[in-house]
Amino acid sequence: MARRPVPGQLPAFAAEDIARTEARASEYVPTPHWVPVALVLGMRAAGHPPLPLTGPRIEPAAGYAAIVDALDLVTPPGLWTLCELREDAALHLSLCGPIGSTVRRGDYLTHGSGITGAGLWITNPPWSLAAEFWAKMLQEAAGIGTVALHVPWSFAATEALDQIACDLYPIEGRPYPFARETCWIVAGPERGGRRLRLKKP
């Protein structure tokens, strides 16, 4: 999911200013199916370490499971924990989510996923809270799991990535009409220093 207008003070750094401005366009928009698919296929074609395909997978802002559904079509289906704050979306996930998945309704930033030892945390968070989701996912992954975050490209220039070894995957084109370039940021074991521009499959 993604975005709704949010008030707030202007940040001190230009990149953060841009990131917050783009976040105000909207808060809850489904991730286009091709965006996570482009990440998986791009990694595969470039020979980059793939997203983990074994162990539990966490979607901290699952929405209506757009990322989950896309990944399960191009990778072996995973054992998902789907975290979602909104009641209507959580109900949809409980009725229509992947077989065997667990749905946790509530605030991921407060309560976390409740899972230890997962292989993958992946989400398109509300962009106004991207830094908070990034920090929480990294905390849960504890340097063992892989974290993948879909955000505006401007987020890659903020302090949130300081001292974090990660790979950057800017996406060609504009998946959303209200935002400029977006990207995937991937952190975890064997990550750091790679940059690859992804194209729509």
Image (cartoon, rainbow, N blue to C red):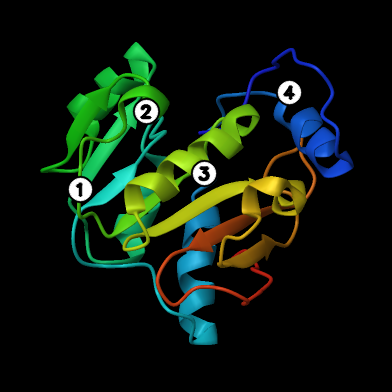
Residue occupied by mark 1: 116
**Callout 2 touching callout 4 (CB < 8 Å):** no
User: Horizontally, is 176 left or right of 124 in the view?
Assistant: right
Describe the element under mark 4 as helix, strand or loop.
loop
Residue occupied by mark 4: 24
Q: Work out whether residue 35 or residue 185 is closer to the camera in this orientation and state it.
A: 185
Describe the element under mark 1 as helix, strand or loop.
loop
Amino acid type of the residue tagged 4 in the rendering: Arg
Residue occupied by mark 2: 108
Q: Residue at x 37, y 50 (%)?
A: 121
Question: Where 114 falls versus 55 (above or below)?
Answer: above
The first of marks 2 and 1 along the sequence is 2
Amino acid type of the residue tagged 2 in the rendering: Tyr
The first of marks 1 and 4 along the sequence is 4
Q: Which mark is in front, 1 or 4?
A: 1
Amino acid type of the residue tagged 1 in the rendering: Thr
The first of marks 2 and 3 along the sequence is 2
Q: Residue at x 54, y 85 (%)?
A: 46
